[in-house]
Amino acid sequence: MTDEPQRVVGGYEVLEEIGRGGMAVVYLARQIELRRNVALKQVAISHDPAFAARFLTESRLTGSLSHPNIVTVHDYVEHGGTAYIAMEYLPRGSLRPWVGRLVLAQIIGVLEGLLAGLEHAGEVGIVHRDLKPENLMLSGDGRIKIADFGIAKALDAVTEGAFKTATGVTVGTPTYMAPEQAMATDIGPWTDLYSVGVIAYELLVGRLPFPPTETPMAILLHHLNDPIPPPLEINPALDPRLATWIEWLLEKDRHARPATAAEAWDVLEEHTFELLGPRWARAARLLEQPQRDHEGEYITVVDSDRDVPAGPDRSTVSSTPEPQAETPAEAPAAAEPAAVEQPVP
């Protein structure tokens, strides 16, 4: 993949780079005809036009979903043998900078939006395969929108070698990957629900079940073979009902997990009403950017009187988190927030 794209790509004027990962570079671009800004993703698959065309065909099959909790894909472009995807531009970036500094109502709001988007995708038989905070974008009104539907599947279908994970299994992020995906077998909506369980564990417990301190293969083997550390042992302050819900999503046997995203939300919604009351959603939006104090540490931006922290005490200052997610190329993703952060596979 060339470092500098063409100034104009398929009717889009490239303005600046806003994100980079192991398999893609994301640019802020302007659609010339409609005079609107988009996020233009340049996918590093090949400079072979036939290869790029095949990737775009695969992407179109699963990437054009329409739902308030899914990032809108505007266009697919092949230019000079390289594949580009033009998507809705969300300048507030991803959920990653917020991890570790949300109150319970906000965490539930994140999970509600995530499960709603997955339920819509499940109705048409589409599986994301690479859910993680970096692929959960924030809308202007503080809602979650899932990015990159179809890209992981398309990459897996058309690429080999360096574009697979180091283990030779399906494209994805080992830290959030379901056991059956690690084995490249029996992938379905239940696979995404396991990833939701890992995200919920990270948000509610205060850490990942298997932090990325080992090799990608070691993390995959943990997900395949080792029990999830009990949430209540890591965070005794967590409500037992939420701990049980997390463990339900993280069952090794996919038949023991919720059958659908709607089923998972029905149970979580009931617990939420019991814990926070029927008006919990009033405090659920992520409306302000996480802020730093003069020493560079993050300050919780919500009023602690509106809600209670979900896990360890975050009512005043929480330290900058360690990097906790890998790109599919297995390099840890930075946890440093930015003014604009677009997901890169």
Image (cartoon, rainbow, N blue to C red):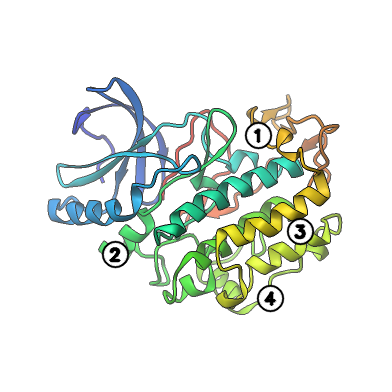
Q: Which residue is mark 2?
A: 157
For the residues labelled 4 and 3, say whether their Cβ atoms are less than 8 Å apart: no
In space, the residues marked 3 and 1 are separated at their CA atoms by 20 Å
For numbered disc 1, what is the local secondary structure?
A: loop
Q: Earlier in the sequence, mark 1 or mark 2?
A: 2
Instruction: Using the image, determine if residue 35 lies above or below residue 200.
Output: above
For the residues labelled 1 and 2, say whether their Cβ atoms are less than 8 Å apart: no
Query: What is the x, y in percent for residue 239?
Result: 83, 57
Q: Amino acid at mark 3?
A: Leu
Q: Which-is-in-front pick, marks 4 and 1?
A: 1
Q: Earlier in the sequence, mark 3 or mark 2?
A: 2
For numbered disc 3, what is the local secondary structure?
A: helix
The residue sitting at 86% across, 59% down in the picture is: 236
The residue sitting at 31% across, 58% down in the picture is: 154
Q: Earlier in the sequence, mark 4 or mark 2?
A: 2
Q: Which-is-in-front pick, marks 4 and 3?
A: 3
In space, the residues marked 1 and 2 are separated at their CA atoms by 36 Å
Query: What is the x, y in percent for residue 312?
Result: 81, 49
Q: Nearer the viewer, residue 161 or 135?
A: 135
Instruction: Using the image, determine if residue 282 lies above or below residue 221.
Output: above
Q: Amino acid at mark 4?
A: Pro
Q: Which residue is mark 1?
A: 285
Q: Amino acid at mark 1?
A: Arg
Q: Which-is-in-front pick, marks 3 and 2?
A: 3
Q: Amino acid at mark 2?
A: Ala
